[in-house]
Amino acid sequence: MTLPQFTYHPDPVGSGSVQPSSTVCVCCNQTRGYVYVGPVYAIEEYEACICPWCIVDGSAHERLGATFVDEDSIGLDGDAGLSDAQVAEVSQRTPGFSGWQQEAWFTHCNDAGQFIGKAGRAELLALGAEAIAAVQDTTGLEDGPQWQAFFEALDKDHGPTAYLFRCRHCATLGAYQDCH
């Protein structure tokens, strides 16, 4: 079965937010071959039991009261200037991702960015100078020994970890980083 397309999270399998699974979805009672494994904000606990189709069509939000991205985390720089519809699309109909601490969602050009994925030093080197600069900008560290030590320590799986986004309109990369 072909996965649905998410405007703000184009590769949820690649990012690790959606995984192959034979789990029956708690929302639609179907086995679709994939399950969402990221954060769920709801009164009930819904761990690895919601299919991507129920996220994208909004039924998981409507039936279960679930959101997948904390509305307050949308916009790395405070007021993101997004419409209520854009915030709802990201929080209610987009797979989130798990960070070490509170996740944050990059915004640019008056829209939410697309989540590319987690990155460590190796992934940033593969993505190039623009990705490295996006992460460095969030640290406040100038080129020098502190930045170099931090960059060398970046690790996709063990932290500190970078989280990368791309603007849907101008392709600017945005990022933030955190550690456990």
Image (spheres, helix red, strand yellow):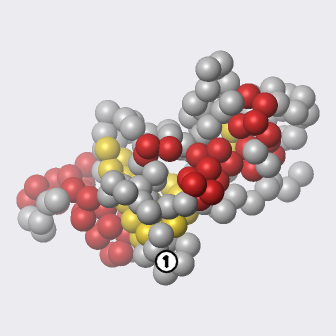
Which residue is rendered at x = 55% and y = 60% of the image? Answer: 83
Closer-to-camera residue (102/152): 102
Closer-to-camera residue (64/129): 64
**Three-letter code for the amino acid on which mark 1 is drawn:** Ala
Q: Can the viewer see residue 123?
A: no
**Outermost residue toward the top?**
44
12 relative position to 87: left or right: right
Q: Position of residue 92 (x, y in %)?
A: 65, 44
- Quadrant of the frame with the C terminus: top left
Q: Is residue 30 above or below residue 75?
A: above
Which residue is rendered at x = 50% and y = 40% of the image? Answer: 70
Which residue is rendered at x = 62% and y = 20% of the image? Answer: 43
Residue under circle 1? 171
127 relative position to 148: left or right: right
Instruction: Label 1, secondary structure: give it.
Output: loop
Q: Can the viewer see residue 111?
A: yes
Q: Position of residue 71 (x, y in %)?
A: 50, 44
